[in-house]
Amino acid sequence: MAILDKAGELQFRSEVRKFLSESLSPQLRNKVLEHALLTKEDLVGWQKTLNAQGWLAPGWPASLGGTGWTPQQVYMFEEECWLAGAPEVFAFGPKMLAPVLMKHGSPEQKAFFLPRILSSEDWWCQGYSEPGSGSDLASLRTRGVIDGDELVIDGQKTWTTYAHYANRMFCLVRTDPVAKPQEGISFVLLDMDTPGITVRPLILLDGTHEVNEVFFDQVRVPLTNVVGELHHGWTYAKALLGHERFNAGKIGRSLRELALLKRLAAQPDMRGRSLLEDPRFAERIAAAEVDLLALERTTLRLIAAAQAGVGIGVEPSILKIRGTEIAQNLSALLVEALRPYQPGAESRDALGPLPPPAALLRQYLNWRKLSIYGGSNEVQRNIIAKFALGL
C-alpha cells in the first residue's frame, strides 16, 4: 500500500471536506461543537448518512461494503470528521465486532450481521468488564453452561456503554471453568431482548446516563451465536481490541479541542485582557500543542511503517496513553479558560458559537474515564514494560 504524496493527500482531504460541508447538517454540527449531549437518533442518523455515501466503515474491504482505503486515508478521513464537528461513529459494531466476524465468524453470521451493522439496524454493546474483572479481564466469572444446542448464561457485566440503546451485545462468557483463565472463555452474540437480561443504569460523575450494569439470569442463547470455536474467545477478544490501534489517541478530537482552547483563551475579560496575554497560561497551551503534534507525527510514522509491511508491536499502547493524557489535559485547560467575559462576548466569537461553561465542565468530568477504559493506562504501561522492555 502506497503512502499518498502531498498532492494526493490534499485531493483526498478536499473530497472529504466537500462531503462533510454538504452532508453534515448545521444543527448536528453545532450540537457537537457546542459539546451538547447527543441522542441515539443523532448518532444513528449520521451513521446512515455515512453509509449512504459508502463511508461508514472505511476500514472494511470494499467487497463487504467498505471503502478499501489505506490506513493513511482512514486516519485522514476520521481526522477531518472530528475537525468538521461530525459525531463520532460508535465503534462497537463497525470498528470492533465487524473485523472479528470477518475473520472468525461463520458464513451465516457474516451474511446476517454485517449488513445490519452497515444499515445501523443493529446497535451493539460490549459485554466485557465485570465487577472485579475490569483490567484483569481474564478473571471474568459470567458463566455459560451448554444445554443441548444452547448456552445458558448467568452472571453480570458492568460499565456497559449504551447498553440501554443496544439491541445486541457481543459478550465474553466462561464456558470451561476448569481451564486456565484465558483458555476457557467463549465469544458470544446476544439479542438484548432475550428473556433473563436486565439492564440497569449507572450514572457517571458528570450526571449523564452513558453506562450500565447488565445482569444475566438463565439466559438461553443458541450455540450458533458463538463466534469461532467454543472456549477460544480470548483470542478473538484480543484481536478485537487491536483494531483501533492507529486512532487510539483520537488526535483529530484533540486538535479540535486545542483550537477551541485558543479561542476561549483569546476572549477578553472584564478588564479587556485575555489569557493568551498571561505568559504562564500561554506556555501551557503551547506545551499541550507540542505534545499533540508529537503524538500525531508518531502516529503517522506508525501508519507509514504498517503500510510498508512492518509489524506493529506495543506502539498502540503508547498512543492510547499519550492520547488520553493529552485529551484530559486539554479538558482541564478548557475549564480553566472559563472566565468572566465582557458583556455579550460569552457565547460566541468571529468563528461562531462557543460551548456553554456547563458543557465544558461536564466534558472535563466525563473525560476522567479516558485513562481507564479500553485498558487502563496502568495496564498499557505494564504491556509496554513486559513486551517491549522485557521487564
Image (spheres, grey):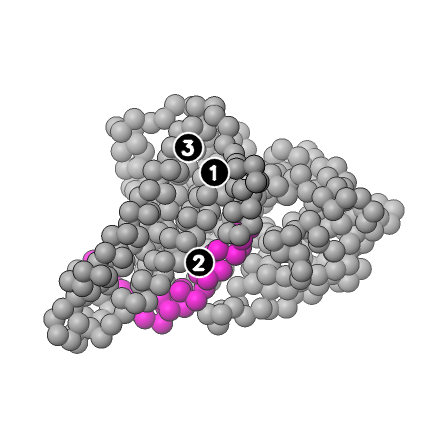
Q: 169 or 44, which is in the foreground?
A: 169
The amino acid type found where label 1 is placed reads Glu
Q: Give the residue at x 37% y 46%.
A: 251
Secondary structure at numbered mark 3? helix
Left or right, 92 with respect to 105, comes to left
* Other-residue count near label 3 (Cα within 10 Å), few / some / many at <14 / 14–19 / ≥20: many
Secondary structure at numbered mark 2? helix
Residue hosting label 3: 303
* Other-residue count near label 1 (Cα within 10 Å), few / some / many at <14 / 14–19 / ≥20: some
Please report the bounds of the magenta region as a residue range.
351-376
Q: Give the residue at x 62% y 56%.
A: 134
Looking at the image, is mark 1 or mark 2 earlier in the sequence? 2
Secondary structure at numbered mark 1? helix
Looking at the image, is mark 3 or mark 1 earlier in the sequence? 3
Residue hosting label 1: 315
Residue sticking out furthest to the right: 148
The amino acid type found where label 2 is placed reads Asp
Examine the rendered structure and indicate whether residue 151 appears above or below residue 328.
above
> Quick check: is 352 in the magenta stretch?
yes
The x and y percentages for residue 293 are: 31, 44
Decide if residue 300 is in sight here: yes
The amino acid type found where label 3 is placed reads Ile
Examine the rendered structure and indicate whether residue 202 appears above or below residue 93.
below
Q: Quadrant of residue 269?
A: bottom left
> Quick check: is 20 in the magenta stretch?
no
Q: 42 or 209, which is in the foreground?
A: 209
The x and y percentages for residue 354 are: 27, 64
Residue hosting label 2: 42
The reply to whether callout 3 and callout 1 are in contact (CB within 8 Å) is no
